[in-house]
Amino acid sequence: MADVFEKEGKPSAESNQGALADGLMQIFRPAVEELDNRVISVRKSQVELREQIDKLAQDLHRLSELQEFPIDLEPYVKKLMNSRRRVMLVNNILQNAQERLGRLHQSVTRETAKRKALLEPSEF
C-alpha cells in the first residue's frame, strides 16, 4: 500500500487513474448491459415482425388468387414489402450499434485490466 502513496501521503497519479477507470467502469457497465439487452430484445421483435409481414404478404397473394372477382391487392403487398425493407434496415442499424457497443465494452474492459495490472505491485 505504501507504493501507491507518494511521500506526502497523497495518492499517486497511477492510483488516481486506476480509481477513475474503475469508477467509470462501474458507472457505464450497467448502462451498457441494459442497452445491449434492449437491443437484443428489439432485434428479436424485428425478426418476428419481418416474419409476420412475410406471412401476411403470402396470405394476401393466395387470397387474391382464390377470388372469383380478383381484387387488386398488389398495392397492399407492395406496402408490406416496403415495411419489411424498413424493418430490415432498422435491424441492420441495431446490429451495427450492438457490435460497436460490444467492441467498446471489450475495449473498456481491456483498458481497465491494463490499468489494474500497472497499479498492482508485481510479486516475484
Image: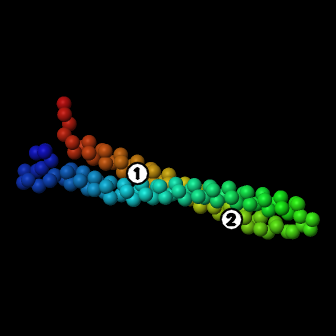
Question: Which x, y percent locates residue 61?
Answer: 82, 60
Question: Can you give x and y, in whole percent of width and height, for residue 57 in the image?
Answer: 76, 60
The residue beneath circle 2 is: 83
Which residue corresponds to the image point at 63% horizontal and 56% vertical from the top-left? 48
Q: Residue flagged by tag 1: what amino acid is it? A: His
Q: Mark 1 — residue?
A: 105
In the image, taking residue 56 as reference, residue 68 lies left or right, namely right
| Residue beneath the point at 82% across and 67% down | 73
Around disc 1, counting alpha carbons within 10 Å, would you say few (fewer than 14), some (14 to 19), or many (20 or more)? some
From this viewpoint, is residue 120 visible?
yes
Of all residues, the one furthest to the top in this rendering is 124
State whether residue 97 appears in this view. Answer: no
Secondary element type, mark 2: helix
Separation of marks 2 and 1 at Cα, in angstroms: 33 Å
Q: Quadrant of the N terminus?
A: top left
What amino acid is labelled 2 in the image? Answer: Ser
